[in-house]
Image (tube, helix red, strand yellow):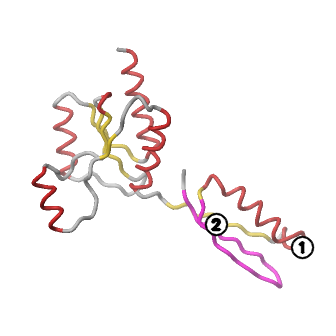
């Protein structure tokens, strides 16, 4: 699901504009509502601009987790605590407890699958992340970088398909 800004402008004597943040799933609905609001006189002058925003890595991960838990509840998915902002004391304690920079975002133990999730545009894999992925592959695990939740979904579906063939 992509998020965007809908900007609506009624041109004419009573010029008005309004912006609304909504998901791309609701763009058509929002346009329909605005069209009814302006009435017949302004309907021909209704200008709608939609600017889609790139979801954050967090939004991508939340979407993937929701999908996975609904679509495949028999395969548990777990997220690592990396990437979360913490104070120095907590970060130091967590490092002593074993948190490691670059460890992949997600693990599906039943599939032996690790996923490093990135935004669809702009996400960069760090040297530490590359190192962890290479290490995990060397241990016999499947370790993938996925740009967006939909790419991760495809990798998971492929892994489940391979798992079911065993």
State the image coordinates of residue 99 (x, y, percent, origin top left).
Answer: 17, 51
Direction from residue 135 to residue 21 in the image, left or right: right
Query: Residue sitting at 22 percent across and 47 percent down?
Result: 103
Which of the two residues, 8 or 84, is positioned nearer the viewer here?
A: 84
Which residue was labeled with disc 2?
Answer: 6
Query: Residue sitting at 44 percent across and 32 percent down?
Result: 73
Q: CA distance from mark 2 to mark 1?
A: 21 Å
In the displayed structure, would residue 132 be above or below residue 12? Answer: above
Which of the two residues, 129 or 59, is positioned nearer the viewer here?
A: 59
Q: Dot 1: few (<14), some (14–19), or many (≥20) neighbours within 10 Å?
A: few
The kind of secondary structure the magenta stretch mainly shows is: strand
Direction from residue 105 to residue 140 in the image, left or right: left
State the mark number for residue 41: 1
Q: Residue 111 colored magenta?
A: no
In the displayed structure, would residue 138 be above or below residue 90? Answer: above
Query: Residue sitting at 36 percent across and 21 percent down?
Result: 163
State the image coordinates of residue 118 (x, y, percent, origin top left).
Answer: 36, 51
State the image coordinates of residue 18 (x, y, percent, origin top left).
Answer: 68, 75
In the displayed structure, would residue 160 be above or below residue 68? Answer: above
The segment highlighted magenta reads 3-22
| The furthest residue to the left | 96
Q: Quadrant of residue 69?
A: top left
Query: Residue sitting at 44 percent across and 55 percent down?
Result: 59
Q: Residue 11 colored magenta?
A: yes
Q: Sequence-wise, which precedes: disc 2 or disc 1?
A: 2
Circles 2 and 1: CB atoms closer than 8 Å: no
């Amino acid at each position: 699901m992509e998020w965007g800004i809908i900007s609506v402008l009624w041109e004419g004597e009573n010029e008005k504009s309004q912006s609304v943040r909504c998901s791309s799933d609701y763009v058509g609905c929002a346009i329909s509502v605005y069209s009814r609001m302006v009435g017949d006189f302004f309907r021909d002058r209704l200008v709608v601009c939609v600017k889609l925003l790139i979801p954050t890595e967090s939004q991508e991960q939340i979407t993937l987790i929701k999908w996975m838990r609904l679509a495949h509840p028999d395969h548990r998915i777990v997220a690592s605590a990396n990437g979360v902002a913490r104070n120095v004391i907590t970060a130091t304690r967590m490092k002593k407890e074993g948190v490691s920079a670059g460890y992949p975002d997600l693990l599906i133990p039943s599939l032996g699958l690790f996923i490093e999730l990135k935004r669809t545009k702009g996400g960069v894999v760090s040297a530490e992340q590359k190192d962890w992925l290479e290490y995990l592959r060397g241990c016999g695990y499947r370790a993938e970088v996925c740009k967006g939740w939909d790419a991760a979904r495809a990798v998971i579906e492929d892994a489940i398909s391979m798992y079911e063939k065993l």
